[in-house]
Amino acid sequence: RRREPLLLPDRVGRRALRFGISEVDPAIQSWLGVPLLAHDRVMGCLVVYTDRPEHLLTRNDLDLLVTIAGQASIAIDNVQLYGQARDRVIQLTTLNNIANTLSGTLDAQHVLDLVGSSAVAVAGCDAVALYVWWDGQQEVSPDMPTLVRYHGLSGSFVNSPPMPQLLKRPDDQRTQPMIV
């Protein structure tokens, strides 16, 4: 909670009660926890403990663990940032491929298929619903969108699709779907 190291050098059970922790393994003789911090967030914590009463943790152990936690935090954050950058490259590559494919076809059904399947790949989501306004070309209300493609949705959703939430744009008479 405080983003600070915590050393319970002895009487761990009794000291833990002060922090509202009631269930502590009675074998634990000494406990030390140090937060893993990156920028403005806590990524986790590094915890050591001993069950040997002849080897209680000290301030020196705390200083050492703080140093290790600082280095570990940097390494973990770098790995996470690298993973995010890699994921972004994959998304951008996928988007580029989609754009190239879309620009090479005039078949509406193929475009809808591609957009529906691509949304899953680009967003990394489990399900997608694609609604389209038909501008009066279909025998449905031109003011309400129609579910035209879906992936990963239940049969009850597909058989009775809910209308997406619509927002009125101030600069246009047409409403826009709210994307979630």
Image (cartoon, rainbow, N blue to C red):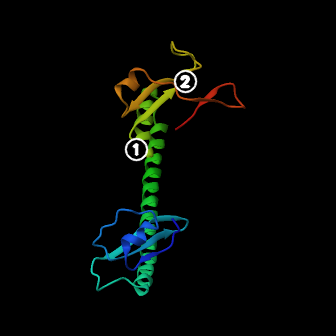
User: Does 122 sit above or below residue 106?
Assistant: below
- Where, by quadrant of the figure, is residue 11 drawn? bottom left
**Residue 140 placed where, x, y %?**
52, 14
Specify the label residue 121 is tagged with.
1
The mark nearer the N terminus, 2 or 1, is: 1
Residue at image position (57%, 34%) is 178
Q: Amino acid at mark 2?
A: Trp
Callout 1 secondary element: helix
Extreme residue toward the top, this view:
139
Q: CA distance from mark 2 to mark 1?
A: 23 Å
User: Does 131 sit above or below residue 55?
Assistant: above
Which sits in the foreground, 174 or 134?
174
Residue identified by numbered label 2: 133
**Residue 75 placed where, x, y %?**
42, 72
Categorize mark 1 by other alpha carbons within 10 Å: few (<14), some (14-19), many (20+): some
Categorize mark 2 by other alpha carbons within 10 Å: few (<14), some (14-19), many (20+): some
User: Does 138 sit above or below residue 53?
Assistant: above
Callout 2 secondary element: loop
Residue at image position (33%, 75%) is 49
User: Does 60 sit above or below residue 125?
Assistant: below
Residue at image position (50%, 73%) is 4
Which sits in the foreground, 104 or 91?
91
Extreme residue toward the right, this view:
171
Which sits in the foreground, 75 or 122?
75
| Residue contact between numbered discs 2 and 1, judged by CB atoms under 8 Å | no
Q: How many marks?
A: 2
**Residue 177 placed where, x, y %?**
57, 31
**Residue 10 placed where, x, y %?**
37, 79
Specify the label residue 177 is tagged with.
none
Q: Amino acid at mark 1?
A: Ala
Residue at image position (31%, 73%) is 28
